[in-house]
């Protein structure tokens, strides 16, 4: 089950990393993504910064507060 609505800057969520990926979607910039399993069982794929992407692993918990970037908890 995937969440189809895009996650915005003012949204808040927390969950566990279930998958990590990266890609050059526009051919020149590297984008980093994680798939998060939320508390309600839904999954959402979100773009995160390179430093956070390099510091997390599958099974780690990530928290996103309104107006802030996601952080590893």
Image (cartoon, grey):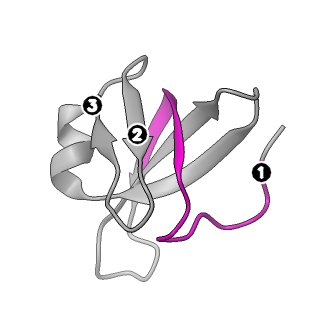
Marks 2 and 3, the one that precedes in the sequence:
3
Q: Residue at x 51, y 32 (%)?
A: 19
Question: Could you say whether the residue bearing mark 2 is in a helix, strand or loop?
Answer: strand
Which circle, 2 or 3, is nearer the viewer?
2
Q: Residues within 10 Å of mark 2 (few under 14, many from 20)?
A: some
Q: CA distance from mark 2 to mark 1?
A: 17 Å
Q: Residue at x 38, y 69 (%)?
A: 24
Q: Are marks 2 and 1 in contact (CB under 8 Å)?
A: no
Q: Which residue is mark 2?
A: 63
Q: Which residue is most to the front? A: 66
Q: Are marks 3 and 1 in contact (CB under 8 Å)?
A: no
Q: Residue at x 76, y 35 (%)?
A: 42
Q: CA distance from mark 2 to mark 3?
A: 12 Å
Q: Quadrant of residue 54?
A: top left
Q: Residues within 10 Å of mark 1 (few under 14, many from 20)?
A: few
Q: Are marks 2 and 3 in contact (CB under 8 Å)?
A: no
Q: Which residue is mark 1?
A: 3
Q: Is residue 20 above or below residue 41?
A: below
Q: Which residue is mark 3?
A: 56
Query: In which quadrant is the C terminus drawn?
Result: top left
Q: Is residue 64 on the magenta stretch?
A: no
């Amino acid at each position: 089950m995937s969440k189809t609505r895009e996650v915005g800057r003012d949204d808040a969520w927390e969950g566990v990393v279930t998958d990590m990926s990266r890609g050059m979607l526009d051919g020149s910039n590297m984008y980093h993504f994680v798939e998060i399993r939320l508390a309600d069982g839904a999954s959402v794929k979100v773009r995160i910064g390179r430093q956070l992407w390099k510091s997390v692993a599958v099974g780690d918990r990530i928290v996103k507060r309104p107006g802030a970037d996601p952080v590893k908890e």
